[in-house]
Amino acid sequence: MNPLIITCAITGAEITREKQPHLPVTPQEQAVAAEEAIQAGASVIHLHVREDDGRPTQRVDRFRESIDAIRARCPRAVIQVSTGGAVGESIENRAKPLELKPEMASLNLGTMNFGEDVFYNHPKDIVALASRMRQLGVLPELEIYEAGMLESAFRLLKQGVLREPLHFQFVLGVPGGMSGDPRNLMHLVSLLPSNQFHWGVAGIGRYQLPLAVQAMVMGGHVRVGFEDNIFYHRGEVAQSNAQLVARISRIAKELGREVATPEKTREILKIG
Ligand code: KMH
Ligand code: ZN
């Protein structure tokens, strides 16, 4: 089976220190969390940044600080910046970290209810973000929360806005999108027409582990981390992002699935 790409979403935009005391917030904390996650088997760091007081921000200087700090501790990591930001962030701000020309960036494929909020992704903004990524040589990771968004991605591929090979992240379990029911992942994967596509799954909350295991068996990739889930077991907060990554690496080993190094990940996703 193909090597397993583990992405670690170390911080996110919504989780607070009150809920997860080990949440990395400052660039230095993020660098330590990223280094530990890479050592535990992650190869991609999905990056949101915060101000020192924990507020989410899309300030380009803050992204630069975090990326420099992560690079200093783990130069091999593939860094994927978020263009999703926090709910309610302007599209102009969401696009800002692209100017740093990261290797990867997230691209959200549609508008949806997101818990009690609405996560807006206007079609023209999706096209603009995708086009800017293409101009700057940034690989988009396509964030898919329900099946209609996957079909939107296929339309954008036909229109030439996106290019193969596409890399999908199925984010399942956000209230407002598809839940983490295993049949939803089966259905989404069944809609992928060929192996010209890469896919992974990010299960939210209690869905994180079962969906990760399902994806590993199905040949997909996995995202874990505090952005999506703060618990190790029910009611027991995880001690670090790396703890969540290490569990996936151990299960992969048991399943006989090699864990991709950052170098292998670049080769698989054709980065650089
Ligand atoms: N914070 C969520 C509203 C992404 O990084 O692209 C959106 C999000 C997706 O986290
Ligand atoms: Zn994110």
Image (tube, rainbow, N blue to C red):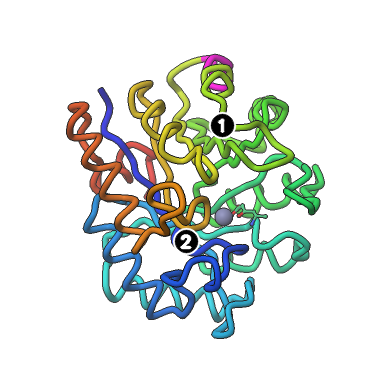
Q: Disc 2 or 1, which lies upstream in sequence? A: 2
Q: Residues within 10 Å of mark 1 (few under 14, many from 20)?
A: many
Which label number is shown at residue 180? 1
Residue at 63% x, 77% y is: 55
Q: Looking at this view, is 169 or 164 the one in front?
A: 169
Residue at 28% x, 66% y is: 35
Vertical placement of residue 260 versus 118, above or below: above
Mark 1 residue's CB less than 8 Å from ligand 1: no
Q: Looking at this view, is 137 or 41 the one in front?
A: 41
Residue lying at the far front in this picture: please name it. Answer: 235
Vertical placement of residue 234 versus 162, above or below: below
Write down which quadrant ligand 1 falls in. bottom right
Residue at 46% x, 69% y is: 23
Q: Quadrant of the N terminus?
A: top left
Which label number is shown at residue 102? 2
Vertical placement of residue 81 versus 30, above or below: above
Mark 2 residue's CB less than 8 Å from ligand 1: no
Asked whether residue 74 is drawn in magenta, I would say: no
- State the SS at label 2: loop
Asked whether residue 192 is drawn in magenta, I would say: yes
What is the three-letter code of the residue carrying label 1? Gly
- In the rendered image, which quarter is residue 109 located in? top right
Range shown magenta: 188-193
In the rendering, at what x and y percent does residue 3 appear? 26, 33
What is the three-letter code of the residue carrying label 2? Pro
Q: CA distance from mark 2 to mark 1?
A: 30 Å
Q: Looking at this view, is 98 or 17 the one in front?
A: 17
